Image (spheres, grey):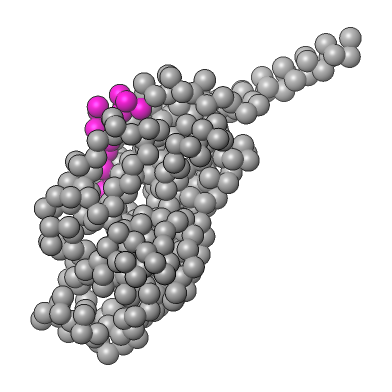
Amino acid sequence: MRLVSTLLAATLGCALAASALAQQITGAGATFPYPIYSKWSDTYSKQTGVKLNYQSIGSGGGIAQIKAATVVFGASDAPLPPDQLKEIGLAQFPMVIGGVVPVVNLQGIQPGQLRFTGPMLANIYLGNIKKWNDPAIAAANPGVTLPDQAITVVHRSDGSGTTFNWVNYLSKISPEWKEKVGEGTSVSWPAGVGGKGNEGVAEYVNRIKGSIGYVEYAYVLQNKMIYGLVQNQAGNFIKPDIASFQAAAASADWSKTQDFYLILTNAPGAQAYPVTAATFILMYKQPKGCRGQQAALAFFKWALENGQQEAEQLDYVPLPPSLAQQIEAYWQAQIH
């Protein structure tokens, strides 16, 4: 009799939890996609009554929370390798594509006026280039008046997929960076001050004269920041925008990946922006206890099929229909 009562209580508890989750989906992680997730949540809630409760805490936090099964999904701009996903029992798929952009606080400099090469950015973040009128910066910016001002480097202080893509790019173009610092969601920074989230980096750069940081492009627009152009593989200095992100994404062949494990930095193409990145969702293949898997998948399905115009409005690259179909087929095969 006691066993029956226990089972009934557990069933009732799951039913109540399922009812609550039907009205709210919990997720946590990357700050990179927070602007579009927030927009989608608002639109979806008005249409369905189901709300997305998303904590913008950084990719490292999102990975930790999904591992701990405290949220229905985690979000990360650093994709997990297939062997790690298998070990934990997770599925992974992309949602949108954007770009990581160098931003500065320099008097007299206009958005898009300053040009950066990859090695130059690496040397700034290594602390090798210390002033804005350094000969290397001046050589890439003829005709631009550069101040005799110290550079303050701003980086992320939390585990970050934005950082992962930034330092992944620097590792690809700078042997010294690769040897001394390397890549990951967190690294041992040689110089600078740390801000939490894209929001924190944007706030520091806007506040500190002579600073440089890196943020997702939506934060550039929201905070009206001064951004720089970055030289790509073809030698062109590329403006970050939806067209250059799409040009970088065009080289991606997702059909050849396992669990959509793909990094887009330093992509080929004359107009490809070199620090383009996808942002990913992490979910358990088998629900952990009473979870809102299906409610979350319904939200993501709606976002892929109906939310892409809103993504473009915030300068994210919508996933092409063919990739959306691959993702939905992946759900059917992997998530139960």
Residue 69 position within the rendered picture, expressed as x and y whole percent measured from the top left = 62, 37
The residue that appears at 22% across and 50% down in the rendered structure is: 267
**The quarter of the displayed image where residue 227 is located:** bottom left
Q: Is residue 101 left or right of residue 5?
A: left
97 vs 157: above or below? above
The residue that appears at 39% across and 67% down in the rendered structure is: 179
Q: Say how many tags the image has.
A: 0
**The quarter of the displayed image where residue 325 is located:** top left
Residue 134 position within the rendered picture, expressed as x and y whole percent measured from the top left = 24, 85
| Whether residue 226 can be seen here | no
Q: Nearer the viewer, residue 301 or 126?
A: 126
Q: Which residues are magenta?
A: 314-327
Residue 86 position within the rendered picture, expressed as x and y whole percent measured from the top left = 51, 33
Q: Residue furthest right?
A: 1
Q: Is residue 281 left or right of residue 209?
A: right
Image quarter where the N terminus lies is top right
The residue that appears at 29% across and 32% down in the rendered structure is: 256
Magenta stretch encompasses residue 281: no
Q: Is residue 70 left or right of residue 173?
A: right
**The quarter of the displayed image where residue 142 is located:** bottom left
The residue that appears at 24% across and 40% down in the rendered structure is: 252
122 vs 145: above or below? above
Residue 47 position within the rendered picture, expressed as x and y whole percent measured from the top left = 41, 28
| Whether residue 148 can be seen here | yes
Magenta stretch encompasses residue 319: yes
